[in-house]
Amino acid sequence: MPDTCSKCKKKVSMWKSFYVGDKVLCENCHKKEEEKIKKREALKSEIVYGLGGWLIFVQIALIFGIIMGAQMLIDMTDVVIYWYLILVWCVLQVIVLTFMYAKNKKFPYLAIIWVWYSFLFVSVSFAGYTFFGAGETESFSIFPLFLWILLLIIAIIGTIYFKNSKRVKNTFTK
């Protein structure tokens, strides 16, 4: 007695039909279903989450930034405005790191703010060094300009990463 395929409605002999749950499938439809299942399983295995990947570098940068900022706060006493900029930078890094380890969904936005604040912080430092620090006795150094360009590139790439990364979207959901 021939059965009818649930998908394509072809008549299928009992010997060439496949039963999937309460569905009867012909050979072609059964192959398509198996391919869909394999694709679904492959996609499940491709889902990335957790604090690995590029987020390891973010963690390292935040931890070293906090240590470096604390050292700068201890050493820096002559320029009050600069001291407050460093203090805000340190506090921002602690907040970003806390949200990162809590896997809070606000982390990507805070990370973008942190990356751009770091860039602006170096920009202000570079401007202060260029206009006030390098007098006639000091020679101009290319290093602050290199650091400024490097942080600009990192800020742009970081913004794109935190907005588009699958790992970031899958990890920070709380």
Image: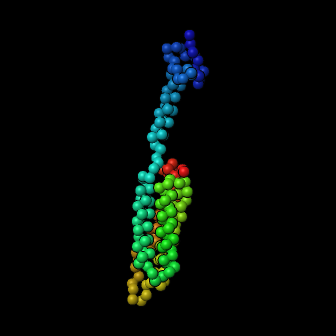
> Is residue 140 in sight in this rendering?
yes
Q: Nearer the viewer, residue 21 or 154?
A: 21
Residue 162, x across and y down, in percent? 51, 57
What is the residue that sits farthest to the bottom in this orientation?
136
Residue extending farthest top: 1
Q: Can you say whether 31 is above or below 79 in the image?
A: above
Which quadrant of the rendered structure holds the N terminus?
top right
Q: Looking at the picture, tell me which residue is in the foreground, 162 or 25.
A: 162
Where residue 6 sits in the image (x, y, percent)? 59, 22
Please identify the quarter of the rendering in which residue 61 is found. Answer: bottom left
| Residue at figure coordinates x 41%, y 82% from the top left | 140
Q: Which residue is depicted at the point 46% across and 83% down?
A: 78
Question: Is residue 144 at all visible to an observer of this figure?
Answer: no
Q: Residue at x 57, y 15 (%)?
A: 3
Check the image and tell me how it is coloured.
rainbow
Q: Residue at x 47, y 33 (%)?
A: 38
How many dots with numbers?
0
Locate residue 60 relative to residue 159 in the image: left or right.
Answer: left
Q: Position of residue 128 (x, y in %)?
A: 48, 80
